[in-house]
Image (cartoon, grey):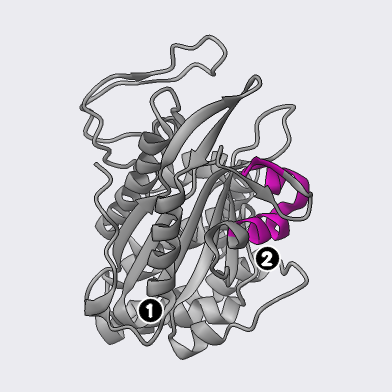
Amino acid sequence: MEARRLRRSKKNNSKNSKKKWISISLIILFLAGAGFLFRKELSLFAFNTLLKKDVKTTLDRSYKPIGDEKEDTPVLEGQPFSILLLGIDQRDQEPSRSDTIIYSVIRPKDNKALLVSIPRDTYTDIIGRDVTSKINSAYAHGGEKMSIDTVENLLNNRVDFYGTVNFNGVIDVVDAVGGVKLPITKLIENKNPQHEKLRIEPNKPIYSGHEALSYVRYREDSDFKRTERQRIFIKAFMEKILELKNITKVPELIEIVGSNFSTNMNPDHILELAETMYLNDTLPDFESYMLQGNGKMRGSTWYYDIDSEDLEYTQNLISNWLNGDINKQDLIHPKDMN
């Protein structure tokens, strides 16, 4: 037993030196998916016995309040709540910007979630700087707090919590679960010499962590396609977690989460939410949407201008999902973007 513990310790220490990535949505999906290994009360027993201590330690390290915290009342009462997911893509010699911005509404009682993608080049007021610029610059200048204030102003809806993740660590996460299935039917390749080299062959049964990272990073088609790939990846990762039959993999995955994830949601309440999802018979039902608009040059810089009518529609969509008095059957479904 002691030898096994020493081997695990050495393995974990080597893992800590790597860049890792995962988001709060994937944590919730991971916990819910792991429950399917055991089913119902057995899953909760397994979670409390085998996983809860390690998860709690990880979440304690990741808990980073921003100074003006809201109570976790919606989580405790099972009411709808929102999470702003920020994927940080740190490049050499560049300031950190939120490369991925997803406004999420979680409805625990209905086992449903809404993911609204905000294009990173969206032209909007940056709250706290008194300028109008790309929305992803809010994180570069004011971190999570400025990002939250800016998104709340744009969408005219509250942000209850945030979850920030290191985008580069996707390699370790995907490789740890043995790769993911991705619907790639054509060669994906960066041809712009100013972009990093990127090439993904089509029709492979499984894609590695490096290929998955390239898949979500590829940008030479459109913002719509890029944000769609991000959501496709989340679903593919969820499905891979459900295929995971070896429970001994769980501690390794939990360790990968730790150093590259931060949130202002109380760790105890995250665990309560995870336990609730453990006892569900079905996976969360995810619906997604992306703010619509058109690209426009201002000087030498390209921006994404949000369509005013679509912005109003999106604001109403979010308000509908955040309203705990609205029944599941009366929720507005995101309109077809095709």
Q: Nearer the viewer, mark 1 or mark 2?
A: 1
Residue in the image at 31% along x and 42% along y: 180
Q: Does the magenta stretch include residue 154?
A: no
**Residue flagged by tag 1: what amino acid is it?**
Pro
Identify the disc placed on residue 33: none
* Quarter location, residue 269: bottom right
Q: Is residue 137 magenta?
A: yes
Q: In this view, does 313 lie to the left or right of 267?
A: left
Q: What element carries label 2?
A: helix
Q: In this view, does 28 lie to the left or right of 305?
A: left
Report the span colored magenta: 132-151
**Residue flagged by tag 2: what amino acid is it?**
Arg
Residue 226 picture location, percent across and down = 41, 36
Q: In this view, does 223 lie to the left or right of 19?
A: left
Residue 71 picture location, percent across and down = 63, 84
* Quarter location, residue 233: top left
Position of 178 relative to 203 (above/below): below
| Image quadrant occupied by the C terminus | top left
* Quarter location, residue 299: top right
Taking depth in this image into account, of 186 and 123 the one nearest to the observer is 123
Q: Is the magenta stretch mostly helix, strand or loop?
A: helix
Identify the disc placed on residue 61: 2
Identify the disc placed on residue 108: 1
